[in-house]
């Protein structure tokens, strides 16, 4: 039995760092000696320096906020899509951090329905070993979801229950990272449509939760097609 899964995450908002603005003393005057010219230089340069400092401060804040979506201890899951074998894809969506536990509970219940198969269940995700699987395992421990824990806790790095389509495609090519979309396109399969992972942050802030869930679900369809295409040659 195979479980195809994809998650979307959102970073927790970081604390605002102190904004330190440049002052008159920070303006480089070179060899200027004339008081009038010095004042003119300051009046021309200081506003630009202040604007640049504010822009850099905002940019660093935004970068940290978006980056938190990649860290399981500094973000939360906002969408889970999964499919068991060839069954239809199920989409679960959270609108707030507090709702993360609800969609995880739904996934845990679904896994509970196939509990006898969990010891041999093959979980399939793209870059799953580096992202989806640890995120789900960490939350299973946090919230006490036994079935999620059993599904995403493996016996060592090379447990064949953990299937990563990135690794399946890479083979020995460890230098390059291949996106799921690029692999699907290479095989002539349908890839991503409309949204990309980079759009999720802004879409979530805009309240487009259904769009995110739809995007996540489509990725599971692409994932399953890519997996089946690669595995044809493994039989």
Image: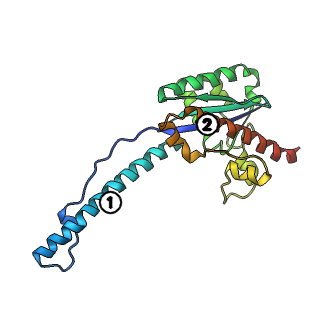
Q: Give the number of the mark in front: 1 or 2.
A: 1
Between 160 and 27, the residue placed more toward the observer is 27
Residue at 54% x, 25% y is: 101
Disc 1 crowd rating (10 Å Cα; few below 14, some 14-19, many 20+) is some
Residue designated by label 2: 7
Residue at 53% x, 28% y is: 100
Between 22 and 112, the residue placed more toward the observer is 22
Residue at 35% x, 55% y is: 55
**Image-quadrant location for residue 91:** top right
**Which coloring applies here?**
rainbow
**Image-quadrant location for residue 221:** top right
Residue designated by label 1: 52
Q: Is residue 24 left or right of residue 146?
A: left
Residue farthest to the left, as pictured:
35
Q: Earlier in the sequence, mark 1 or mark 2?
A: 2
Q: Is residue 71 above or below residue 42?
A: above
Residue at 19% x, 80% y is: 31
Q: Give the image location of residue 35, x and y in percent.
A: 10, 74
Q: How many marks?
A: 2
Q: Is residue 26 left or right of residue 220?
A: left
Between 211 and 105, the residue placed more toward the observer is 211
Q: CA distance from mark 1 to mark 2?
A: 36 Å
Q: Give the image location of residue 200, x and y in percent.
A: 55, 42
Disc 2 crowd rating (10 Å Cα; few below 14, some 14-19, many 20+) is many
Determine whether the residue tagged by mark 2 lies in a helix, strand or loop.
strand
């Amino acid at each position: 039995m195979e479980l195809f899964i994809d998650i979307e995450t959102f970073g927790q908002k970081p604390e605002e760092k102190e904004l330190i603005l440049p002052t008159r003393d920070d303006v480089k005057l070179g060899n200027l000696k004339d008081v009038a010219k010095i004042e003119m230089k300051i009046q021309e340069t200081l506003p630009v320096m202040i604007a640049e400092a504010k822009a850099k401060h905002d940019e660093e804040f935004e970068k940290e906020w978006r980056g938190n979506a990649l860290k399981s201890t500094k973000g939360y899951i906002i969408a889970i899509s999964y499919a068991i074998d060839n069954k239809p894809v199920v989409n679960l969506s959270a609108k707030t951090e507090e709702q993360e536990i609800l969609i995880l509970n739904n996934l845990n219940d679904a896994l509970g329905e196939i509990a006898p198969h969990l010891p041999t269940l093959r979980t399939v995700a793209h870059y799953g070993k580096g992202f989806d699987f640890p995120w789900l395992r960490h939350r299973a421990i946090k919230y006490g979801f036994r079935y999620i824990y059993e599904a995403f806790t493996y016996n060592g790095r090379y447990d064949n229950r953990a299937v990563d389509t990135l690794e399946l495609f890479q083979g020995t090519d460890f230098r390059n990272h291949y996106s799921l979309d690029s692999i699907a396109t290479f095989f002539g399969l349908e890839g991503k449509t409309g949204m990309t992972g980079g759009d999720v942050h802004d879409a979530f802030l805009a309240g487009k939760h259904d769009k995110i869930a739809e995007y996540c679900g489509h990725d599971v369809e692409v994932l399953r097609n890519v997996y089946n295409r690669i595995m044809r040659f493994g039989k």
